[in-house]
Image (spheres, rainbow, N blue to C red):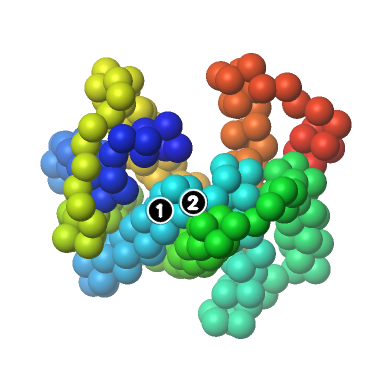
Amino acid sequence: VKEALQGTSVGVFLALRFGLAALVLSAVSAFRRDRVGEGFVRHGALLGLAMLSGFWLQTLGLRYTTPARSGFITGLSVLVVPFVARFLLGRRVRPASWAGVALAVVGLLVLTRPFGGTVTAEVSTGDVLTLASAVAFALQIVFTSEWSPRHPLAPFVTAQVGFTLAGALLSLLLEAPRLAPASPARFAAVVAFTALVMTAAAFFVMNWAQRHTTAVRAALIFSLEPVAAALFSAWYWKEALGPWEIGGGA
């Protein structure tokens, strides 16, 4: 995503990403022909709004902050989830889960070490945007666990992605749309990967899996995202992983 944004505005990238994902998921939903019930549109729209807010704010924040700081701050959604679950919805959160959340936050801090170097006003702006995205992602995690079991899987995921696409298209009115990638073929590959693997497939699995676990446990598992990112970076960019990265990931 950081690479793709070098020649493309946020709204255009998100519209292409979620447009392709919505197209694929719509085909799956049309094939299955599941019937939807009460609350389907409202729940799909609210989750779509949370998803759009999270991705838009995170993607915009990446223009200004560093990937390490973005990874750490986004990962703080794991800290927000148990508070929302406990104090907003009244769900019981076990002491072991609170301990797991604390360990995950410490691990994120050690892994990403985001606070070194000079913090400019621009970086601080990116951090605030990314923190807001972490709250949006936390709400998405909590309410996916609440609402996903009530609706058929394929159309519910399609509705979420569809509402996110609608919001991304509206966000084009807030920016000067730009589509000038340095390598069109590489950009198309990034759009295809983020749409099909990171959106359609990932959110399909996420909605299915959260029917069978709690929001807090899901958030703890999602906190492994920066660990996966570090491993991917080591493979893709040949970035060396030192004791801090290995210790934080562990």
Image quadrant holding the N terminus, namely top left
Please provide percent x and percent y for residue 186: 33, 20
Image quadrant holding the C terminus, namely top right
> Label 2 belongs to which residue?
64
How crowded pointer 2 is (Cα within 10 Å; few <14, some 14-19, many 20+) is rated as some
212 in relation to 226, above or below: below
For the point 67% across and 37% down, the residue is: 227
Please provide percent x and percent y for residue 240: 73, 22
Q: Is residue 242 left or right of residue 156?
A: right
Mark seen at residue 60: 1
> Which type of secondary structure does the marked residue at label 2 adopt?
loop
Q: Amino acid at mark 2?
A: Tyr
Q: Is residue 210 left or right of residue 152?
A: right
Q: Quadrant of residue 88?
A: bottom right
Please provide percent x and percent y for residue 119: 65, 56
The answer to whether residue 168 is visible is yes
Between circles 1 and 2, the one closer to the viewer is 2
For the point 59% across and 26% down, the residue is: 232
Mark 2 and mark 1 in contact (Cβ < 8 Å)?
yes
Mark seen at residue 27: none
Q: CA distance from mark 1 to mark 2?
A: 8 Å
The answer to whether residue 58 is visible is no
For the point 20% across and 52% down, the residue is: 176
Please provide percent x and percent y for residue 68: 63, 44
Q: Is residue 82 left or right of residue 100?
A: left
How crowded pointer 1 is (Cα within 10 Å; few <14, some 14-19, many 20+) is rated as many
Nearer the observer, 153 or 144: 144
188 in relation to 54, above or below: above
Q: Amino acid at mark 1?
A: Leu
